[in-house]
Image: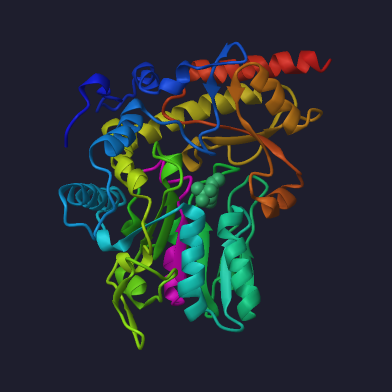
């Protein structure tokens, strides 16, 4: 591929067991921004991650040197773009444990990936009285599509509840997952509590009853080494924008035989084999599920994001997250009355850390922190059933990634102390 010599990016994390976060920070141009007169402290990666220079660069390289529509063209640019697009698919397939590239479907995000399964596999396979099991900690993206499907089909939604500590309560699981279960749709890592769910164990039980398992990997794929076959899932959905990649790009892994049996989701160009006024036949995988001109630029760019993550090393990223989450929890616990939601054991959780203050509303916390250059999120985090279970209307959530270090956590905690003084507490 031609390179742009004026703008070549620097290598990122080092392939060692320890992350050099100073070097990593230097890879992210946005971290040099000043926000409200302060250094930007970005603690909102669970909502969307920032992008390293080489990802920004890859997007501009694509438009400078290879943009064209893919698959149909016979000219050089069409060939270049097609090769890059399919290379990225292979990369995703390798990244999630070495599946077949035909088992990877590009779409617009975790939300669309889950809707695809609900609209295709769900429509074809869920019938009256069938049961769909979800957890109480699902993001709306992995709840509402199943709720709507259940309404259409007169199926039943069953829930795996949470414990007060923010783990899944599996004590009644044998009466929740059973012979009527057709699907277990479960988040791999909670975007609110940080909890990492024992998806493998749950999948094994689901399999015993002939049920399929869909993993919502929106939070896990950016932070954990993923092997979908080892997890035992039939479908796994995740979003590029939370893992250093561009916005507007989602990934669905599905087992080949399931995807082959599923009807298409959208109809039009690219997804057909033959069309006449009498008959339409559909293309082979993966094209059957990628109707129309896809998000070529972002798919091609995502290749660079995965390369970046691999160079850092997902095991290193995970170890860093464990260390920094432990540090953050300890520091937040030192603030009197501040309540952390979710597990305290760092091995069983990721770096999305929700907390509440006894007297200050999460929105006020977020607004105050923003005035100090600190970006966190506040609200129900698209998980209203979970909020109800926790007896909260909202939480503040700081979420960590590989470009965060202890200085970011210290800035957060200092600002929280200052905030309490500001509010006269
Ligand atoms: N599931 C979880 C656990 C999430 O955190 C998110 C994003 N907040 C989604 C699904 C939806 O992802 P997207 O908006 O990228 O489709």
In what quadrant of the picture does the C terminus appear? Answer: top right
Left or right relative to 7: residue 118: right
Q: Nearer the viewer, residue 68 or 32?
A: 68
Compare residues 216 and 64 and report the one nearer the observer: 64
Q: Residue furthest bottom?
A: 278
| Residue 2 lies in the magenta stretch | no
| Camera-side residue of 381 and 282 | 282
Res. 380 visible in picture: yes
**Residue positioned 34% across, 86% down in the render:** 279
The picture quadrant where one finds residue 22 is top left
Magenta span of residues? 203-224
Image location of residue 287, percent across then percent down? 31, 65
From where the camera sits, is residue 205 visible?
Answer: no
Q: Is residue 172 left or right of residue 20?
A: right
The residue shown at (30%, 34%) is 58
Rendered location of residue 145, percent (x, y): 58, 64
* Foreground residue among 301 and 193: 301
Location of residue 371 in the rendering, given as x and y in whole percent from the top left corner: 67, 18
Q: Is residue 223 left or right of residue 380?
A: left
- From the viewer's perspective, is residue 90 above or below residue 193? below
Residue at 35%, 22% in the rendered image = 27
Q: Residue furthest right?
A: 424
- In percent of width and height, residue 59 lies at 33, 36
- Residue 183 in the image: above or below residue 7: below
């Amino acid at each position: 591929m031609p390179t742009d010599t004026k703008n070549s990016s620097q290598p990122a994390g080092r392939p060692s067991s320890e992350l050099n976060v100073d070097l990593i920070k230097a890879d992210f141009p946005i971290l040099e921004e000043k926000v409200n007169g302060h250094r930007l402290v970005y603690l909102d990666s669970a909502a969307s991650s920032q992008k390293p220079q080489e990802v920004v660069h890859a997007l501009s390289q694509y438009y400078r040197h290879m943009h064209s529509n893919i698959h149909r063209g016979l000219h050089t640019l069409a060939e270049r773009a097609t090769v890059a697009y399919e290379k990225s698919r292979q990369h995703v397939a390798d990244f999630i444990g070495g599946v077949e590239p035909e088992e990877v479907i590009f779409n617009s995000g975790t939300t669309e990936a889950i809707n695809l399964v609900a609209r295709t596999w769900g429509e074809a396979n869920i019938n009256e009285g069938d049961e769909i099991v979800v957890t109480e900690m699902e993001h709306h993206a992995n709840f509402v599509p199943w709720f709507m499907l259940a309404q259409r089909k007169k199926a039943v939604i069953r829930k795996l509840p949470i414990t007060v500590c923010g783990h899944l309560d599996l004590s009644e699981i044998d009466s929740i997952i059973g012979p009527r279960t057709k699907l277990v749709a479960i988040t791999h890592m909670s975007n609110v509590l940080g909890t990492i769910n024992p998806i493998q164990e749950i999948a094994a039980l689901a399999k015993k009853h002939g049920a399929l398992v869909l993993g919502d990997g929106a939070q896990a794929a950016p932070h954990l080494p993923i092997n979908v076959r080892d997890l035992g899932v039939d479908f796994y959905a995740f979003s590029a924008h939370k893992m250093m990649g561009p916005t507007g790009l989602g990934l669905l892994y599905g087992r080949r035989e399931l995807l082959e049996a599923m009807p298409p989701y959208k109809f039009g160009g690219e997804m057909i084999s033959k069309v006449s006024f009498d008959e339409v036949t559909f293309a082979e995988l993966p094209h059957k599920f990628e109707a129309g001109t896809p998000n070529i630029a972002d798919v091609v760019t995502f290749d660079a994001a995965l390369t970046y993550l691999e160079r850092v090393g997902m095991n290193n990223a995970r170890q860093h997250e464990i260390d920094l989450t432990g540090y953050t929890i300890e520091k937040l616990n030192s603030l009197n009355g501040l309540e952390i939601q979710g597990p305290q054991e760092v091995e069983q959780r990721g770096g999305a850390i929700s907390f509440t203050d006894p007297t200050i509303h999460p929105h006020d916390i977020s607004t105050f922190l923003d005035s100090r250059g600190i970006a966190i999120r506040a609200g129900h985090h698209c998980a209203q059933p979970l909020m109800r279970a926790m007896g909260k209307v909202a939480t503040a959530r700081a979420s960590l990634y590989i470009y965060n270090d202890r200085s970011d956590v210290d800035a957060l905690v200092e600002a929280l102390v200052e905030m309490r003084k500001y509010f006269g507490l």
